[in-house]
């Protein structure tokens, strides 16, 4: 068994968005497992927006611990059991998911490991954040036949699955928001979105007006080095250093439009994409996008608040607040419901989601967009790429290249 491993630690609490030097990759001693611990060699771990809040020390009211300088980062991971206690139901060679990512090897209590469902065509899919989208749509909002569903942050780990799930549950029209033209094209062309609002413009597949917008009509805050059709399949690989590093708040347009003028522009374009209003909103962004969604809500619209990227990816603050101005009079008159979704409040969702997700994947009814960044040395940059909007779908760091292709 290895005696040394490598892991990503918080070197200093970020002041605003993380910068190079806030995270560091270090060699660390790996003790022998004791008691009920498993020794797991990680193959993949998830890169997720909520980590920004943990790094900034703003997670005091959440069910997960905040990170302090010197702490090892953590999050969902998939790996192979190298050692297990004699009385463990898990054996060496088994694939498991667990919460101790951001390291090459992990000592994990048996009760924190979940065997990988053999029904998944790609085991990495068990690291998806789709359970939040599924739970929001099935436990909070429901989807009625023919509903118009809006997903903010549609190209992220939650949003890229939320629109597809809504369609499978009966939605008649699915609209998304994102921050880049290339993402909008993939959302419409690959994931079946009917229209996508992008930086004050919108693209769609159901009318001349929506299809006539050229790339130079799409407002962006920065640039992305690549082309809009890269990875027309389901997996995108990011090579170290390919991002321009200048695309602030391209992360699905999370902060774009938070000014009053930007909000008006966003709301106007959203109204064009949803001329008849929306019935269901899965909001991963908050801020101005949530306010704009309220403007186009139909009477009785149901909102599920799943994320707050506008606060988590803000250039100032600790990532733990996403203020929004809500007209309560309008909410009352429209009979709108707004509910927050937290996975720990719905413990039955994950198993149900896992079974349905695996079945949908096997049947070819859903796609799992995945961005892989190779090597633990690139893990800090992978988080930066996520914040800068250079990733599409679920983002993972790949520690064992080529294992699942």
Image: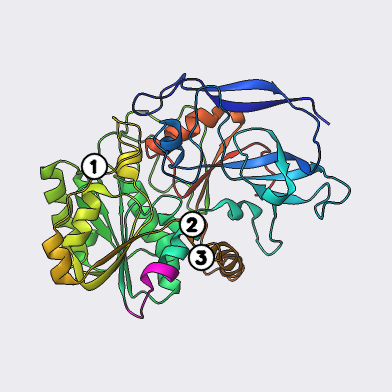
Query: Is residue 53 in the magenta section?
Result: no
Q: CA distance from mark 1 to mark 2?
A: 27 Å
Q: CA distance from mark 1 to mark 3?
A: 29 Å
Q: Badge 3, how many Cα within 10 Å: few under 14, some, many 20+?
A: some
- Please say whether residue 329 is visible from this viewpoint: yes
Residue 209 placement, left or right of 170: left
Q: Badge 1, how many Cα within 10 Å: few under 14, some, many 20+?
A: many
Which residue is nearer to you in this view: 335 or 128?
Answer: 335
First along the sequence among labels 1 and 3: 1
Residue at the spot x=80%, y=28% of the render? 2
First along the sequence among labels 3 and 2: 2
Residue at numbered disc 3: 366
SS at mark 3?
loop
Residue 216's disc number = none
> Residue 47: image x %, image y %?
51, 40
Of labels 1 and 3, the one closer to you: 1
The quadrant in which the N terminus is found is top right
Residues tagged 3 and 2 counted as in contact (Cβ below 8 A): no
**Magenta stretch in the rendered image:** 138-146
Question: Which of the colour schemes (rainbow, by chain, secondary structure, one colour) is used?
Answer: rainbow
> Residue 310: image x %, image y %?
30, 43
Residue at numbered disc 1: 256
Residue at the spot x=40%, y=55% of the render? 159
Residue at the spot x=17%, y=54% of the render? 326
Residue at numbered disc 2: 343
């Amino acid at each position: 068994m290895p005696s040394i491993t490598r892991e990503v630690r918080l070197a200093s609490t970020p002041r605003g968005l993380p910068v190079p030097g806030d995270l560091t990759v270090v060699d660390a001693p790996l003790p022998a497992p004791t008691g009920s611990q498993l020794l797991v060699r990680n193959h993949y771990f998830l890169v997720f927006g909520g980590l920004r809040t943990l790094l900034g020390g703003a997670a005091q009211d959440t069910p997960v611990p905040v990170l302090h300088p010197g702490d090892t980062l953590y999050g969902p991971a998939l790996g192979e059991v190298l050692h297990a206690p004699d009385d463990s139901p898990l054996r060496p060679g088994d694939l498991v998911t667990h919460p101790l990512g951001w390291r090459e090897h992990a000592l994990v209590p048996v009760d924190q490991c979940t065997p990988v469902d053999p029904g998944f065509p790609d085991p990495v899919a068990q690291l998806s954040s789709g359970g939040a989208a599924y739970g929001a749509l099935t436990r909070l909002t429901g989807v009625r036949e023919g509903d118009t569903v809006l997903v903010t942050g549609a190209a992220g780990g939650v949003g890229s699955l939320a629109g597809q799930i809504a369609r499978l549950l009966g939605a008649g029209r699915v609209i998304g928001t994102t921050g880049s033209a290339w993402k909008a094209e993939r959302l419409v062309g690959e994931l079946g979105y009917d229209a996508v609002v992008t930086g004050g413009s919108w693209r769609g597949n159901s009318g001349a007006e929506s299809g006539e917008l050229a790339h130079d009509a799409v407002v962006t805050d920065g640039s992305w080095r690549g082309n809009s059709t890269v990875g027309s399949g389901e997996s995108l690989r990011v090579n170290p250093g390919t991002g321009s590093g200048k695309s602030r708040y391209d992360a699905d347009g999370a902060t774009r439009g938070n000014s009053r003028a930007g909000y008006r522009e966003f709301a106007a374009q959203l109204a064009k994409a949803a001329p008849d209003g929306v019935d269901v909103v899965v909001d991963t962004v908050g801020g101005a996008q949530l306010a704009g969604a309220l403007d186009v809500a139909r009477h009785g619209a149901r909102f599920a608040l799943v994320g707050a990227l506008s606060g988590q990816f803000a250039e100032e603050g600790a990532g733990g607040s996403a203020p929004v101005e809500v007209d309560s009079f309008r909410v009352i008159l429209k009979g709108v419901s707004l509910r927050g979704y937290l996975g720990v409040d719905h413990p039955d969702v994950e198993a149900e989601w896992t079974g349905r997700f695996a079945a949908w994947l096997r049947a070819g009814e859903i796609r799992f967009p995945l961005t892989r960044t190779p090597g633990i040395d690139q893990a800090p940059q992978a988080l930066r790429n996520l914040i800068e909007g250079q990733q599409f779908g679920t983002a993972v760091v790949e520690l064992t290249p080529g294992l699942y292709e």
